[in-house]
Amino acid sequence: MSDNPYQAAPAMGSAGIGAVTATKELKHVHPLQAGKVLGVMYALMGLIILPFFLIAAVMNPNQAAPGLVVAVLIPIFYAVGGFVGGIIMAAVYNLVAGMAGGIRMDFE
């Protein structure tokens, strides 16, 4: 038992008695892998908003064909943007983590 009479209660969701936690530091992110993951995530976001663009495209009969083409291309553009953005952000993270240190995370 500690001599400190002001012991703080364990935080909600913290490790229970006997659980082992380890603090790790994320020092490097592989840019190509980050690009692939973000490309897929952004493509899924594009698919989620796709119905709204389709509805807007068919509301105006004069602009339906170009609107449908744009609606189909949106997930592709999102995927490419997510891929390129993921690569750039991973590279920037690696530079900053090298200078300031990486993000620290606790694992149980």
Image (cartoon, rainbow, N blue to C red):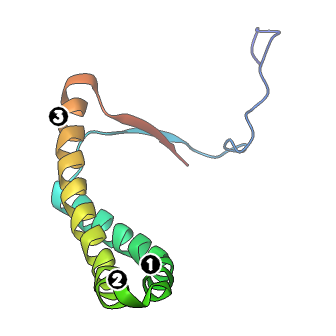
Query: Residue 50: x and y, percent?
Result: 44, 80
Query: Between tags 3 and 1, which lies in front?
Result: 1
Cα gap from disc 1 to disc 2, whole angstroms:
8 Å
Q: Residue at x 42, y 83 (%)?
A: 57
* Residue furthest right in the image: 5
Q: Are the two marked residues, 1 and 2, in contact with CB atoms closer than 8 angstroms?
A: yes
Q: Which residue is mark 2?
A: 67
| Percent coordinates x, y for residue 69 in the rendering | 28, 86
Residue type indicated by callout 1: Phe
Number of residues whose C-alpha sits closer than 10 Å to that of mark 2, classed few (under 14), some (14–19) or many (20 or more): many
Observer-side mark, 1 or 2, equals: 2
Q: Is residue 94 above or below residue 90?
A: above
Q: Residue at x 76, y 9 (%)?
A: 4
Disc 2, SS: helix
Q: Which mark is residue 53?
A: 1
Answer whether labels 3 and 1 touch (C-beta < 8 Å).
no
Viewer-side residue, 7 vs 69: 69
Q: CA distance from mark 2 to mark 3?
A: 41 Å
Q: Is residue 55 left or right of residue 63?
A: right
Total marks in image: 3
Q: Amino acid at mark 2?
A: Gly
Quadrant of the rendered image containing residue 75: bottom left
Residue beneath disc 3: 95
The mark lying in front, picked from 2 and 3, is 2
Marking on residue 86: none
Left or right, 25 with reference to 1: left
Mark 3 element type: helix
CB under 8 Å between discs 2 and 3: no
**Nearest to N terminus: mark 3 or mark 1:** 1
Q: Disc 3 and disc 1: Cα gap in Å?
A: 38 Å
User: Dot 1: few (<14), some (14–19), or many (≥20) neighbours within 10 Å?
Assistant: some
Three-letter amino acid code at disc 3? Leu
